[in-house]
Image (cartoon, rainbow, N blue to C red):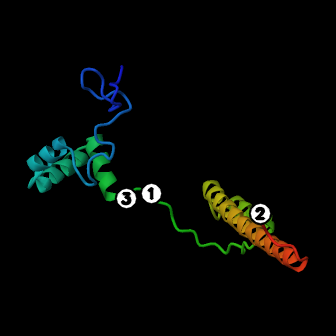
Amino acid sequence: MDTDPANTGRDQGGRFAPGWSGNPAGPPKGTSHRATRAAQALLNGEAEVLTRKAVDLALAGDVTALRLCIERLVPPCREARVHLPVPALESAADLPRILAFLLALAAGGAVTPGEAEKLARLTGEYAKAVELAEIEERLRRLEEAAANRGSTDGRQDA
């Protein structure tokens, strides 16, 4: 599909070419589709009757209605908060000790292997941040020392 020379993303027929949008920002947040609004208008005031019908169907053995009711009664499983006495991580040298701790927790069943993996990944990201801060501090000290040597040698920066 050829787009026009003005590079508006439209083809010769005036339609947008694949990959182009007439509204790149999309609809405003919270905007519902016309069909959704129409369905909500039709169902307005019928929630109690429809709910009762779904429950009756579920109790009568309708598997789909039963699944619908159960999904509404039991909230989806979310991640639980983890309260663990994780050793302090102050430098990258602490990482092996903490990873061994997480491995022992997973092996002992205190956390799932997936939870241990997520915690290990988070620990690794923290270790990278600590390491970066240490490197920046060492670089700052080296630059400071070099500047002090340069001023005591009688040399001046150009």
* Among the two numbered marks 2 and 3 on one chain, the one whose residue lies closer to the N terminus: 3
* Among the two numbered marks 2 and 1 on one chain, the one whose residue lies closer to the N terminus: 1
Residue sitting nearer the eye, 112 or 61: 112
In the figure, residue 106 lies in which quadrant?
bottom right
Numbered circle sitting on residue 100: 2
In the figure, residue 75 lies in which quadrant?
bottom left
Residue sitting nearer the eye, 130 or 65: 130
Rounded to the nearest whole Å, what is the CA distance between mark 2 and mark 1? 28 Å
Measured along the vertical axis of the image, is residue 23 above or below residue 155? Answer: above
Left or right: residue 21 compared with residue 156? left
Rendered-image quadrant of the N terminus: top left
- The kind of residue tagged 1 is Cys
Residue 96 position within the rendered picture, expressed as x and y whole percent measured from the top left: 79, 63
Left or right: residue 94 compared with residue 8? right
Residue at figure coordinates x 32%, y 25% from the top left: 4
- The kind of residue tagged 2 is Ala
Residue 46 position within the rendered picture, expressed as x and y whole percent measured from the top left: 10, 52
Name of the residue lying farthest toward the right:
153
Callout 1 touching callout 3 (CB < 8 Å): yes
Numbered circle sitting on residue 65: none
- The kind of residue tagged 3 is Pro
Residue at figure coordinates x 16%, y 43% from the top left: 34
Residue wearing tag 1: 77
Q: Secondary structure at mark 2?
A: helix
Q: Secondary structure at mark 1?
A: loop
Rounded to the nearest whole Å, what is the CA distance between mark 2 and mark 3? 34 Å
Numbered circle sitting on residue 75: 3
In the figure, residue 141 lies in which quadrant?
bottom right
